[in-house]
Structures are given as C-alpha cells and as structure tokens.
Image (cartoon, rainbow, N blue to C red):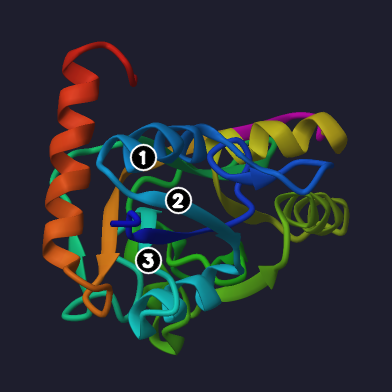
Amino acid sequence: AEAQTIRMGYIEFTPVFYTDDDGVAQGLLVDLARKVVPAAGYQLELKSLPVKRMANSLIKGEIDLWAGLKTLEGFDGNTYSGESRLLQICLNAYTIGEDPAISIKEDLNGKMIIGLRGFSYGGWVTYLKDPANQIDFIEVDSHESGLKVLERNNKAGNKCYLLDYEDPLIKALQAYPVNDLRKSPINCLDAYFVVSKKTPNAKTVLDRLENTYKELKKNGEVK
C-alpha cells in the first residue's frame, strides 16, 4: 500500500525553517523531518505558511504536522503533542545601550515593546496585549523590521525593547547591523512534534514519529 502522506507546515524562521532562493524548504527542523518522517514509514510534504495560518491549518486538519512550540493558540484539545524535545529556541529582550534587564514579563509593564506579528512568545503575547499592563506593543512583520524600529525609536529618545529569538535575530543582524545592541535572556522554548487530531490515525502517526526519532537519536543519526 502507498505510504500515508504527512503534510508538514513550517514558517519562515531562519535557521530553524526557511525557503531558499530555489524555493526549497531548508532549516534545522526541516532536515530533522526529512530523516524522521520517511524512516517512520510516511511520505513528507512541506508547505511554508505564516504563523497564524499554519496554526489554524493544523487545527482544521489542512496540514498534519508541525515541529515547534506546542503552546500556540487553539492547539489545546485539537492536537496531539510529543514528549521528545527536538530543539530549544531561546527568547531574548533586546535594547540599545544601557537599560534595565528584562527577566520576567512583569518587567515589561509600562514600556514600549516591539514584537513579531503572529508569534505567541510562549504565551506572553496575551500579557503584552492586555491594556491593564500599559505596554505600548508594536508589531512588525520581520526580524529586520524589528531592528529598524528599535533603532529608530532609540534615536528619537524613545527607549524600547525588541522581543525576538536568538538564532533568527543573529541572521537578521548580518543584513542590518545595529551598534551597542544588548540582550536580556528571558527563557528558552522547546520544540516538539505536534500532530492535528484530524489527521487519519493521528495518535499512531505521533507515536511512530516519536519512536523513530528516539531510535535515530540513540543511533546518532539525528542530533
């Protein structure tokens, strides 16, 4: 019988996931999926989607698999999540020059905060958008745009912070360097396999992916 096709959604989040100049999916978790999914007995199909659309597509069963945070809005009750941590993604608060460090979300109260549109920040986005916390929350569409808004506000005398993930921001800094950029580590978020409950044999699919990943990791075939 023909192997079941697993449709995996990914976002543009270099170097974890991205589409190269030839239109081919690349990245750390894409490479992982290309090893694990076929080894588990399935065919893999990859599709790039914006964050919110990816999450909604998984909930609706338009895609079957996501490898990343399992805390995205709507996942609870609509998806099965694995227990094996595939990757750790570190979140920082960036500012220019000397500013008080950020360590907990209450440190953001009353401040100007820049964030990427569609990102949940491990659940922090609800806090950021709550008027009771008096946060001036500015949403941007890319990591590079976040750096530009941070720099522009700093030059205007408006102290603010950019919430961003370390690996993609390092990549963005290569295209748009910013002087005297400082960071405060906030937390590290873990990536897992997440399968839509509307996927045929969804629980079996997740179990096979988990078991295959553990076996490949034990044998040193994946990091």
Q: How many marks?
A: 3
Q: Is residue 83 magenta?
A: no
Instruction: Give the CA separation, mark 1 to mark 3.
Output: 35 Å
Which quadrant is the C terminus positioned in?
Answer: top left
Q: Which residue is mark 3?
A: 124
Is disc 1 surrounded by few (<14), some (14 to 19) or many (20+) residues within 10 Å?
A: some
Task: Please state the horizontal and vertical placement of residue 48, each as a whole percent of the image.
Answer: 62, 60
Q: Secondary structure at mark 1?
A: helix
Residue 124 seen in render = yes
Quadrant of the rendered image containing residue 189: top left
Tell whether label 3 touches label 1 (CB within 8 Å). no
* Label 2 Cα neighbours within 10 Å, binned few <14 / some 14-19 / many ≥20: some
How far apart, in angstroms, are the residues tagged by discs 2 and 3? 32 Å
Between residue 35 and residue 156, name the one nearer to us.
35
Tell which residue pokes out farthest to the top in this image.
220
**Which mark sits nearer the N-terminus, 1 or 3?**
1
- Amino acid found under the numbered disc labelled 1: Pro
The amino acid sitting under disc 3 is Trp
Q: Which residue is mark 2?
A: 44
Rendered image: mark on residue 14: none
Tag 3 secondary structure: helix
Up/down of 107 relative to 135, above or below: above
Q: If you read the primary sequence from the N terminus, does the residue marked by circle 1 or circle 2 appear first? A: 1
The residue under the point 70% across, 51% down is 143
Which dot marks residue 38?
1
Label located before the other in sequence (2 or 3) = 2
Q: On the rendered structure, is 191 left or right of 32?
A: left
Q: Nearer the viewer, mark 1 or mark 3?
A: 1
Percent across and percent down for residue 197 are 21, 76
Q: Main secondary structure of the magenta part?
A: loop
What span is in magenta? 178-182
Position of 23 relative to 198 (above/below): above
